[in-house]
Image: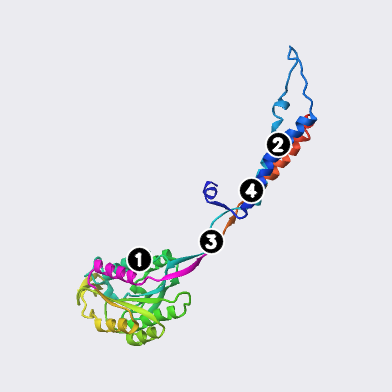
Amino acid sequence: MREWISDIAFADPWYFLLLLVIPLYLFLRKKWLRRTRVPFMISTGAGVHTGTWRTRFIWIPEALRMLAIASAVIALARPQTGFSNRNVTTEGIDIVMALDISSSMYAIDFQPNRITAAKEAAKEFIDNRPNDRIGLVVFAGETFTQCPITLDHLLLKTLVDDADNWQLEDGTAMGDGLFMAVNRLADTTQLNTKVVILLTDGVRTAGEFSPLDAANAAAQLNIRVYTIGVGSKSNAPIPVVDKNGRNIYDLDPRISFDEESLQQIADITGGQYFRATSKEKLKEVYREIDSIEKQKVEVSVTRRYDERFHIFALIAIIALMFELLLRFTIFKSLN
């Protein structure tokens, strides 16, 4: 109750002019009573009472009538809570993050590992883009849309945390991952600016499409691709399972880095290539992309109003009923 009263608004505030009826009514009633009633003197001697409990409370019916009128006027003014439709100018674009979740992303040259550092940086980036629609595509040997483009950033961050390489066959289908991200943006029409952020630590080892073919498709759709190469060195330790089923760390010779392809993808699409050699550097990369991609757009913000006139209409009806009940029963002889 207290919460919506503090945020109340009125759809038809001009009805408050009807409240002027109350002082006008009181003035006219007082003037009428002076004309119709003749004052007289009575003795205040012993045994003569000048008033009863009914005369002391004769003002109650009048007060109930005023309450009924005031409540009815408030109900007519239609008190509401919530927000109206409005257009606001803000910054917002469509973004799809394409995240490599292959086994090499679990290398521990980042703390605690590359994939965790990438997720933390991505979530910080999401928090800094409240007006953007953002989606997430993950890829290893296969690709998967982890989260469609959405403004529900709380859900998106939860799905970022849930992304793991057990979902997909191992490998690095970089081209397929980029192609799926491009397709997710090709289906959107709300905003003109569309961006893919491609993060990987390896070279293409799987997939149907080459990274450059996917980049050309992005360029044809005016989608910029920012590429991020993650890793401080090759042959970094990654967790593996030995023949006895134990988790150990090993130097995996498959961990390599294709900076040339990432640079070409960025050049073809009008984006930029970044190299992240540490967790802190990765966060700096996301902050730089955040500062580059700012666009003023006009968006419609729609919030529904909740009508609150019912309680005031109910008060008016109850007050009027009690006023009539008292006036024609207890106080009838005093009218």
Q: Amino acid at mark 4?
A: Phe
The answer to whether the residues at label 3 and label 1 have Cβ atoms under 8 Å apart is no
Q: Amino acid at mark 2?
A: Phe
Residue at the spot 25% in from the left edge and 84% down from the top edge: 260
Which numbered disc, 2 or 4, marks the residue closer to the eye?
Answer: 2
**Mark 2 burial class by Cα count in 10 Å: few <14, some 14-19, many 20+:** few
N-term mark: 2 or 4: 4
Q: Please tell me in which quadrant of the rendered image residue 108 appears.
A: bottom left
Q: Secondary structure at mark 1?
A: helix
The answer to whether the residues at label 3 and label 4 have Cβ atoms under 8 Å apart is no
Label 3 sits on residue: 303
**Mark 1 burial class by Cα count in 10 Å: few <14, some 14-19, many 20+:** many
Q: Secondary structure at mark 4?
A: helix
Q: Please tell me in which quadrant of the rendered image residue 253 appears.
A: bottom left
Label 1 sits on residue: 123
Q: Secondary structure at mark 2?
A: helix
Foreground of the two, 65 or 164: 65
